[in-house]
């Protein structure tokens, strides 16, 4: 019997973490980080056609400022923080620096996009001349071909969360070697993911803020949205169109049955989608005759193409695939991907929202979870779509353990189950914000008109004559100007400017050291041979 198999059997018999094992220090040292996407728009609200500003540094190597799908889609990234206030402080400082360096442009403060041109005029992000930079751009060309460029301009908040390594070591480390500790962490994080996927619909209900879109987003597409005045479409009970069938989703990917029972099953369930040619994409080809237009012809070019509400993550090294990083070093944190930008917050997220997220995620990681199944995965997806489009409908029923439940009843049960975790977090951090976040959530369940999605529709209709564009444009102008004018200390400004210079130097070094031909690099990068060997070793 393989040693890894013996270790895995031992891990299965290990008791899971429970709340009583966590001391105050564990709960004040939770790791968190934020990745926030925002479109750059010109003063008339059109998607910017300007390249990523030189004043913001290299999108390839800057640690805090990069681009997502489009050259006009900024991604602002915080470092990892133990203290929520410091995390939000850094996010605000990055916003301030960016706002000062995008000329007369604005940061669009909503998840659903601004006035968009036709797909061919949405500029795809460019990262330089190195192989990894070209691979990033080719990957995005593939996304545009497969799903359309407009869908890729949808923006959101990604929230990264983990329990500190000091906590894992204190509770498990004395009697286990490094590989066993990795296996223990993997077990807990995949348990978190299974619980999260089952209950994540509540986050869409509570924090969804995209019930309406500009006409330009749905022009030429099949949809069942209602028409509002002044170029706006909406659904009356929608919470997050971004997370529904019209948003950042893929019918093609519904054929992938991903298992979240453990790292091996997760990787193996993605393997075929990453390695086997998918006929419609194979028909597109890898080049247009001159330039590469896809990284591969598989259903997924790389792991990050798989859409999901949450991902297991391990920081990647240069040129390393995400799945290979997970197989080598295990799950380091989870990335929550279902949060809309909050249009009522100038940086897109509030301290109160983070308090609820931390409580909810702690509940997910420390609560018992059952293995997933194809049937449960299907009901999770159906519940997500129902909440996205009809979440505030009082007649809505969700599938719950092969039965049906109202949003109010199930939501109240989740909030009640989260209470002990909120109290423990409040006690450790000497605050009451976690318990208050649950009280706010309960209020939204009882009063759907208090949810962000309901407030957005009310403000569009009553204050902006039914125009989603006018509503978001007004807030975006206000926030960008405020962030420009807010005080940014000389010390922070100097650090920001040094990061810009350093990122440009790092990009130049990468490009100078490049030796491998791009096609050779592409083949090596998309190859799953190394992952397959590792999977067999761990199996």
Image (tube, rainbow, N blue to C red):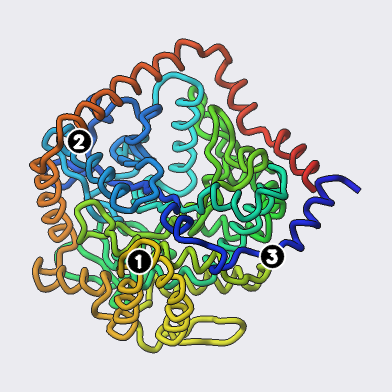
Residue 144 locus on image (x, y percent): 43, 42
Q: Is residue 117 visible?
A: no
Q: Nearer the viewer, mark 1 or mark 3?
A: 3
Cα distance in 3D space between marks 1 and 2: 29 Å
Task: Give the crowd class for mark 2: few <14, some 14-19, many >=20 residues within 10 Å.
Answer: some
Residue 388 locus on image (x, y percent): 39, 70
What residue is shown at x 57% (from left), y 44% (from top)?
303
Q: Which residue is mark 2?
A: 97
Q: Earlier in the sequence, mark 1 or mark 3?
A: 3
Q: Nearer the viewer, mark 1 or mark 2?
A: 2
Q: Relative to residue 476, is residue 55 depicted above or below?
A: above
| Residue farthest toward the right in the current orientation of the protein | 1
Residue 460 locus on image (x, y percent): 16, 68
Relative depth, front residue between 509 and 253: 509
Q: Which residue is mark 3?
A: 15
Task: Give the crowd class for mark 3: few <14, some 14-19, many >=20 residues within 10 Å.
Answer: few
Relative depth, front residue between 339 and 40: 339
Q: Which mark is residue 151?
A: none
Q: Earlier in the sequence, mark 1 or mark 2?
A: 2
Tell me the element at label 1: loop
Q: Which residue is mark 1?
A: 240
The answer to which image quadrant residue 47 occupies is top left
Do callouts 3 and 2 mark residues in contact (Cβ within 8 Å)? Answer: no
């Amino acid at each position: 019997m393989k040693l890894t198999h013996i270790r895995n059997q031992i891990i299965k018999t290990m008791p899971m973490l429970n709340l009583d094992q966590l001391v105050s220090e564990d709960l004040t040292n939770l790791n968190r980080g934020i990745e926030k996407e925002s479109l750059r728009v010109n003063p008339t609200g059109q998607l910017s056609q300007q390249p990523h500003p030189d004043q913001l540094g290299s999108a390839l190597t800057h640690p805090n400022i990069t681009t997502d799908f489009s050259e006009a889609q900024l991604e602002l990234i915080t470092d990892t923080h133990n203290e929520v206030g410091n995390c939000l402080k850094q996010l605000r400082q990055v916003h301030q620096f960016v706002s000062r360096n995008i000329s007369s442009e604005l940061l669009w403060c909503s998840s659903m996009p601004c006035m968009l041109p036709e797909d061919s005029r949405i500029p795809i992000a460019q990262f330089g001349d190195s192989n990894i930079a070209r691979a990033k751009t080719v990957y995005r060309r593939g996304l545009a071909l497969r799903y359309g460029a407009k869908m890729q301009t949808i923006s959101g908040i990604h929230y990264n969360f983990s329990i500190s390594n000091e906590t894992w070591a204190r509770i498990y480390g004395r009697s286990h070697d490094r590989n066993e500790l990795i296996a223990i962490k993997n077990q807990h994080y995949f348990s978190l993911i299974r619980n999260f996927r089952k209950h994540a619909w509540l986050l869409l209900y509570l924090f969804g803020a995209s019930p309406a879109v500009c006409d330009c987003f749905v022009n030429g597409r099949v949809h069942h949205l209602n028409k509002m005045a002044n170029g706006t479409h909406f659904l009356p009970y929608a919470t997050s169109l971004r997370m529904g069938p019209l948003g950042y989703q893929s019918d093609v990917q519904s054929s992938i049955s991903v298992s979240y029972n453990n790292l091996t099953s997760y990787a193996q369930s993605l393997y075929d989608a990453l390695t086997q040619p998918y006929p419609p994409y194979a028909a597109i080809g890898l080049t247009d005759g001159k330039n590469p237009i896809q990284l591969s012809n598989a259903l997924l070019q790389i792991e990050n193409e798989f859409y999901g509400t949450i991902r297991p993550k391990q920081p990647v090294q240069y040129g390393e695939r995400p799945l290979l990083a997970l197989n080598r070093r295990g799950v380091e944190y989870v990335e929550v991907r279902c949060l809309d930008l909050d249009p009522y917050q100038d940086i897109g997220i509030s301290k109160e929202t983070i308090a609820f997220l931390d409580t909810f995620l702690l509940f997910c990681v420390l609560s018992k979870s059952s293995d997933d199944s194809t049937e449960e995965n299907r009901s999770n997806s159906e519940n997500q779509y129902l909440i996205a489009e009809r979440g505030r409908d009082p007649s809505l029923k969700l599938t719950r353990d092969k039965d049906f439940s109202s949003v109010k009843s199930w939501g109240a049960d989740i909030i009640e189950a989260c209470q002990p975790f909120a109290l423990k977090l409040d006690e450790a951090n000497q605050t009451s914000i976690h318990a208050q976040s649950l009280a706010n959530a309960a209020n939204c369940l009882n009063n759907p008109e208090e949810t962000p999605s309901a407030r957005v529709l009310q403000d569009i209709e009553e204050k902006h004559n039914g125009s989603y564009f006018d509503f978001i444009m007004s807030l975006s102008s206000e926030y960008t100007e405020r962030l420009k004018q807010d005080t940014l200390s000389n010390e922070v400004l100097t650090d920001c400017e040094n990061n810009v210079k350093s990122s440009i130097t790092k990009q130049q070094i990468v490009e100078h050291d490049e030796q491998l031909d791009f096609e050779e690099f592409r083949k090596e990068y998309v190859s799953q041979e190394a992952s397959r060997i590792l999977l067999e070793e761990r199996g």
